[in-house]
Image (cartoon, rainbow, N blue to C red):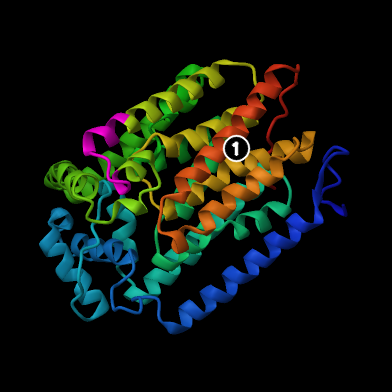
Amino acid sequence: MVSIEISRDHAAGALLAKPVVLIAFALAVAHAVFLASFWVDGLWADRTGAPSDFVAVWAAGKLASAGHPAAVYDWGAHKLVEQTAVGHPFAGYFGFHYPPTFLLVAAALSMLSYATAYTVWALGTFPAYLIAIRAIVGDRIGYLLAAAFPAVLANFTIGQNGFVTAGLIGGTLVLMRQRPIMAAVLLGLLTFKPHLGLLFPIALIAGREWRVLVTATIVALAMAGASWLAFGADTWQAFVGNIGHTSQAFLSEGSADWRKLQTIFGLTRSLGGSEPLAWSLQAMVTLAAATAVAALWRSTVQYEVKAAALGTGLMLATPYLYTYDLVALAVPLAFLFRLGLTRGFLPQELIGIGLACLLVLIFPFVDAPTGFAALLVVAALIARRALTGASIAHAEAPIRPVG
């Protein structure tokens, strides 16, 4: 098989098969072509006239800027501003389910027109994701692999925050050993989406990363305090009250279609399982992920394996995960690529990575939580790496920040 050497700095085994590079290049080009046509057609509404998810952020920013920040959690008031953004009524509702800390960003974006803000948000956050994946992989090929990942398209076309979450998770993990304070700052910023950071405290405690844990807590509290001063206590009270409303609508009633949830909870409900059964299975998966992360972060296995396990566990541990959130799956995959490029790929490892990417890619065509299956595939690949690493004495290779 023809191979391409991708870096002079890597070990002799740092080869990436040419078919892998060509497939990644083809996917990246396909993404670019599709997005170009998407922008030309108009990015503020789909063909049925319904807006994209970003309208929730822009409308929330408008309300906050107008002096009504608590109203972003009032579904009726919020939707009226959403309809103003797109210029016509539409069925359904796009809720703002984030803590008031994210209103600081939303308010800034709302100073632009809706279409301009959408473009600035999507294109402005993409580099953070690219840089994080490139830093993890440790070579410029990381840019191509990041751009080719199928979840990228889902995030672009609805204006969601997957690039931000992936950039923050990846940045935290890649900087933790060399620049722990900077890593902690990024982790503190991740609290704008708290359900995707549930396992970080477990990993940090198990790994005795006290500086990261303490600093991240300080950053998170500072952000909360800033939003409290900017938007008032009533906004935080409205947010807390909205949590139950959101859970009832999306997890109990399936307002957004359970098949879109890329979790064991969503899979169970989409197959007709009861809500108690779905919560029971989700609790089992969450506990298993937390236990595995704690065990690995206490062990002497390679840091790349620990980071990949945490990145995957974060997504397995939450019942609330959509396709655009799977952009963060590129983080554990990047750590697997780093291991493969520096120490050699295990047999069939690239096939497993390809299968995970394919499962993410086909979701729009099969309308089933294939992303959850992708998470399980990646978890299995990481478990295999952990078992392989446990049987061989390895010296940990420090991860160098990009640049």
Position in image of residue 140 (x %, y %): 73, 53
Kindly give the residue lying farthest to the front in the view shown.
272
Residue 63 location, quadrant: bottom left
* Quarter of the image where one finds residue 299: top right
Quick check: is 271 in the magenta stretch?
Answer: yes
Asked if residue 219 is positioned above or below residue 235 in the image, the reply reads: above
User: Which structural element holds mark 1?
Assistant: helix
Left or right for 76, reference 129: left
Q: Is residue 187 magenta?
A: no
Percent x, y of residue 84: 20, 76
Task: Return the residue nearer the eye: 120 or 26.
Answer: 26
Q: Where does the magenta region start and end?
A: 269-280
The answer to whether residue 176 of the structure is visible from this angle is no
Q: Residue at x 44, y 30 (%)?
A: 200
Q: Is residue 318 left or right of residue 370?
A: left
Residue in the picture at 51% in, 56% down: 151
The chief SS type of the magenta part is helix
Residue at the image point whose x is 77% and y is 41% from the top: 341
Q: Residue at x 47, y 83 (%)?
A: 40
Q: How many numbered marks have been drawn onto this rendered protein structure?
A: 1
The residue under label 1 is 174
Residue 338 location, x and y as percent?
70, 40
Spot occupied by residue 166 in the image (x, y as percentages of width and height) = 50, 47
